[in-house]
Image (cartoon, grey):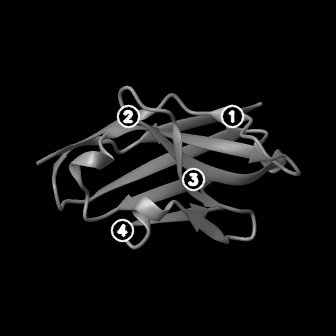
Amino acid sequence: QVQLVESGGGLVQAGGSLRLSCAASGNIFSISAMGWHRQAPGKRRELVAVVNANNSTVYADFVKGRFTISRDNAENTVYLQMNSLKPEDTAVYYCAARKMLRTIYDYWGQGTQVTVSS
């Protein structure tokens, strides 16, 4: 099993920045990719960014150029640096981890609220 704990959410004005952290513990050696997803009220959960075991990254179009995902393997932590935040970025952000050779996410954190005011 793998446990994921997010932190760093909060309230920020449009144009501001936040950095989310996701600390992983447990059987972390089984993990390949880690990603951030988000879910806004009344909307489906959507992928924001992924960092793979080889540190390659994938971003949703709506965050390209504004958000950066990174991975510190020594600290077992994944970060999401969010700049130029917009009100439409308001959502609960979830960290997730995927086992090797899997295409779906196996482990999820509890989520952290990000609210961007206009």
Q: Amino acid at mark 4?
A: Arg
Q: Earlier in the sequence, mark 2 or mark 1?
A: 2
The tag earlier along the polypeptide, 1 or 3, is 3
Is label 4 in contact with label 2 (beta carbons under 8 Å)? no
Secondary structure beneath label 1: strand
Q: Which mark is residue 107?
A: 1
Residue 3 found in image quarter: top right
99 relative to 86, above or below: above
The type of residue carrying mark 3 is Thr
Q: CA distance from mark 3 to mark 2?
A: 24 Å
* Badge nearest the viewer, 2 or 1: 2
Q: Position of residue 111 (x, y in %)?
A: 46, 32
Image quadrant occupied by the N terminus: top right
CA distance for labels 1 and 3: 14 Å
Q: Disc 4 or 3, which lies upstream in sequence?
A: 4
**Rendering coords of residue 15 (x, y %):** 17, 62
Q: Mark 4 — residue?
A: 66
Q: In the visual, does 70 lie left or right of 113?
A: right
